[in-house]
């Protein structure tokens, strides 16, 4: 892209001033439209050191209401951020509906810098590119406007600007060793930047190259591109998004109706013996995964009253409380609902060496949200692939992903509902919503079967816990977690 790029002619000064005045007014008006229509806008600014990203951004945001935008400055990952997946620190910064987030550098800078210093090898670079393309596509598929700007200057001009900054004591601090190294190896950096731009420019999230020789001209280019992008996004806000073909490896899995529950049972005596043995082994493994910095994510879904809570309790009892967290997932809060539906799960990912247990998960998208009409058909149909991508990201990071469906039959659920209803200390566990969901048992079962079939990947398989007998389900869950960790080790 940089090689073939032809700069647009810079307008005369009077024309430039006139267009700038128009663009300032237009962008302020578009911000109001963004707020009214709930369009989330993510703006990524990348480019050469001393190309003027910061100063241009400062000029652009002067025209905006500061209540409805923020600037995320993405420097080197912190020690804490390095213990999370690569995209974690970027994903958690995405805007709410009706807001704008400006990223002052981001995932491009991080990836190209690591590639150039040799800490990211060729295969790892390709994997990062695939992750970035999925990330940006998921955002645009879910209604985000993603605008990406690369601020470009030539080698001599960069050198001149760096020298000018270095000569002034008040601006010397703005020049980093990385900036000087970049200028010294300009051609090598340009080659890598060009490759990255070509690798990640997509129809729904293209790159816009900004001629940064003159800051006022750079400001006008960025503002006019932003205005056009916002106008297009507002017009296309209601469009349906193509459903992508699944390209991830799937394993066959039985339908719920074909799973036998009656013979899956344990006596209390056998259960107590097995429980003690399994918890002892899991405790040992927790120490090993902590030392080796292996993250574990355990996801629970299942019928109401199937025994998820008791199951989780027996696993958690074997773990060091400093190294795990249980996340009970309820209906999304307003600030969560206003973002990509996976945002609240990215926010809850564990550090490497730690364990996260989810009581309900991202699969609500293709169950509750689907059946209760909380998202469109296009949304939930698209979600199977998006979830597979999310779990692939976790697996590629090095996480062990274990997914449990806790299965009971309809008669057992009724018995447990009735017991809860008639036992004062258990009545908090039963709600009107539970009874309403029970009336839709067949619809839910059909949706669950489809979910299992479409997301039972080799890297994040489902395990069905036959839970008419809770003792059996608890031991099977413990043994499964132990087996998955031992296999990974």
Image: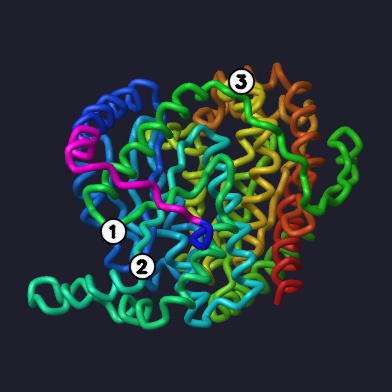
In this rendering, position of residue 381 left or right of residue 84:
right
Is residue 419 visible to the viewer in this orientation of the structure? no
Residue at (52%, 28%) from the top-left corner? 427
- Label 3: how many Cα within 10 Å (few below 14, some 14–19, many 20+): few
- Label 2: how many Cα within 10 Å (few below 14, some 14–19, many 20+): some
Q: Which residue is mark 2?
A: 154
**Image position, residue 387 (x, y; %):** 65, 45
Q: Which of the two discs, 2 and 3, labels the residue nearer the N terminus? A: 2
**Vertical relation: 41 (above or below) 164:** above
**Image position, residue 62 (x, y; %):** 17, 41
**Vertical relation: 245 (above or below) 267:** above
Q: Which residues are magenta?
A: 5-20
Is residue 232 visible to the viewer in this orientation of the structure? yes
- Label 1: how many Cα within 10 Å (few below 14, some 14–19, many 20+): some
Q: Which residue is mark 3?
A: 372
Name the image quarter holding residue 294. Answer: bottom right
Q: Please tell me whether residue 19 belongs to the stretch shown in magenta.
A: yes
Q: Which mark is residue 94?
A: none
Q: Are marks 1 and 3 in contact (CB under 8 Å)?
A: no
Q: Which residue is mark 1?
A: 213
Q: Which of the two discs, 1 and 2, labels the residue nearer the N terminus? A: 2
């Amino acid at each position: 892209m940089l090689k073939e790029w032809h700069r647009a002619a810079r307008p005369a000064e009077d024309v430039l001033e006139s267009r700038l005045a128009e663009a300032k007014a237009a962008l302020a008006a578009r911000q109001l439209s963004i707020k009214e229509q709930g369009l989330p806008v993510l703006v990524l600014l990348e480019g050469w050191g001393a190309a003027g990203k910061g100063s241009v951004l400062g000029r652009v945001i002067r025209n905006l209401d500061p209540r409805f935008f923020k600037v995320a400055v993405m420097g080197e990952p912190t020690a804490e951020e390095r213990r999370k997946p690569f995209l974690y620190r970027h994903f958690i910064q995405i805007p709410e509906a009706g807001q704008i987030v400006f990223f002052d550098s981001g995932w491009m800078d991080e990836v190209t810098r690591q590639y150039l210093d040799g800490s990211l090898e060729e295969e790892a670079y390709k994997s990062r590119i695939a992750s970035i393309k999925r990330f940006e596509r998921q955002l645009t598929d879910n209604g985000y406007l993603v605008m990406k700007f690369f601020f470009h200057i030539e080698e001599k001009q960069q050198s001149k600007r760096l020298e000018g900054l270095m000569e002034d004591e008040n601006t010397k601090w703005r020049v980093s060793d990385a900036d000087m190294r970049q200028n010294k190896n300009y051609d090598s950096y340009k080659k890598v930047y060009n490759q990255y731009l070509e690798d990640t420019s997509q129809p729904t999230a293209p790159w816009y190259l900004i001629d940064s020789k003159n800051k006022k001209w750079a400001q006008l280019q960025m503002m006019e591109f932003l205005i056009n992008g916002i106008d297009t996004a507002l017009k296309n806000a209601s469009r349906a998004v193509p459903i992508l073909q699944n390209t991830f490896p799937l394993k066959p899995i039985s339908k719920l109706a074909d799973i036998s529950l009656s013979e899956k049972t344990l006596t209390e005596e056998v259960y107590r013996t097995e429980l003690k043995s399994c918890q002892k082994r899991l405790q040992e493994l927790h120490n090993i995964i902590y030392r080796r910095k292996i993250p574990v994510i355990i996801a629970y879904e299942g019928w109401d009253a199937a025994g998820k809570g008791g199951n989780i309790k027996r696993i958690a009892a074997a773990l060091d409380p400093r190294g795990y967290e249980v996340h009970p997932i309820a209906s999304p809060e307003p600030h969560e609902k206003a973002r990509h539906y996976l945002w609240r799960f990215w926010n809850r990912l564990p550090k490497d060496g730690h364990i996260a247990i989810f009581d309900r998960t991202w699969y609500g998208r293709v169950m509750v949200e689907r059946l209760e009409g909380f998202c469109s058909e296009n949304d939930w149909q698209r979600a199977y692939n998006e979830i597979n991508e999310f779990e692939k990201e976790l697996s590629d990071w090095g996480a062990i992903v274990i997914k449990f469906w806790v299965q009971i039959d309809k008669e057992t659920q009724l018995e447990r509902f009735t017991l809860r209803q008639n036992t004062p200390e258990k009545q908090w566990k039963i709600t009107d919503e539970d009874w309403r969901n029970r009336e839709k048992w067949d619809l839910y079962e059909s949706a669950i079967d489809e979910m299992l079939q479409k997301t039972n990947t080799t890297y994040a398989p489902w395990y069905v816990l036959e839970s008419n007998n809770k003792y059996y389900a608890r031991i099977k869950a413990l043994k499964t977690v132990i087996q998955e960790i031992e296999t990974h080790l």
